Amino acid sequence: MRCHEVDYEIIGHGIQMVEIELDPGETVIAEAGAMNFMEAGISFDTKMGDGSAVDQNFFSKLWNAGKRMITGESVFMTHFSNSGQGKQRVGLSAPYPGTVVPIDMASIGEEVICQKDAFLCAALGTHINIAFNKRLGAGFFGGEGFILQKLEGDGMAFVHAGGTVIEKRLNNETIRLDTGCLVAFSKGIDYDIQLTRGLKSMFFGGEGMFLATLSGTGTVWIQSLPFSRMAERIVQHAPNIGGREKGED
């Protein structure tokens, strides 16, 4: 199934949203709860699965929904369709502050692997599946685990990330990064986890015991502020719940 052709505009800077413009009959699929607004001609329906295979039977849809549960995502996805006249728009955003990354799937080999909570929305026809990392090191020490999301299709897909996003193009090269800073990578990139060298660096360097290593030819997207890191800092500096500061009456 070929993906629907959708137009879009990224709105904002530090806290972004994406506005999708749909022609009559076009549809965009999104994670549940991502919608900000929709114009009068937009109708939406909650369905089991991404709708990429129209001939799937109930049990196939149930199996795909079960695989989505493994990644911690909702079994259902929301389908926004233009059922009116003329162009209609729907606005979608991530559940936390950050950057929306548009990915033209046709230009990168029609496949991208992303962290399990990075997918935001995509043109109808995009197949969303899970990808098991074959290497045990990446599975046990990869921060986000060995289950990643695989997006397949020839249309536009949108992922979200925390902070600023850097797009790195590798040409038979290798890059290492904090495991939580990885957003996505294209086909042709090999993903592994390696132990940090040196005991001092491992225990006192503050960078963790493991680093993600990506090698090959393709594109890698890196986020500056993973949500897990931001949440950890908030918890560390939050006042004790139920306690009182000195000097309070």
Image (cartoon, grey):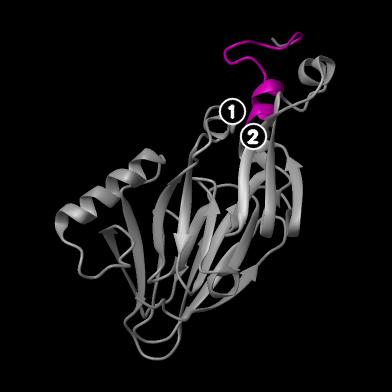
Of the numbered discs 2 and 1, the one sitting upstream in the chain is 1
Which three-letter amino acid code belongs to the residue tagged 1?
Phe
Closer to the camera in the image, 248 or 81: 81
Using the rendered image of the protein, determine whether residue 126 is visible from the camera's viewpoint: yes
Q: Tell me where residue 191 appears, x and y as whole percent.
A: 61, 44
Few, some or many C-alpha atoms within 10 Å of disc 2 (few <14, some 14-19, many ≥20)? many
Q: Tell me where residue 185 appears, x and y as whole percent.
A: 61, 55
Q: Which residue is mark 1?
A: 141
Q: Which residue is mark 2?
A: 193
Using the rendered image of the protein, determine whether residue 36 is visible from the camera's viewpoint: no
* Direction left: furthest residue: 58
Q: Secondary structure at mark 1?
A: helix
* Quadrant including the N terminus: bottom left
Distance from the alpha carbon under mark 2 to that under mark 1: 7 Å
In this picture, is 240 found above or below 175? above
Few, some or many C-alpha atoms within 10 Å of disc 1 (few <14, some 14-19, many ≥20)? some
Q: Do the residues under discs 2 and 1 have CB atoms within 8 angstroms?
A: yes
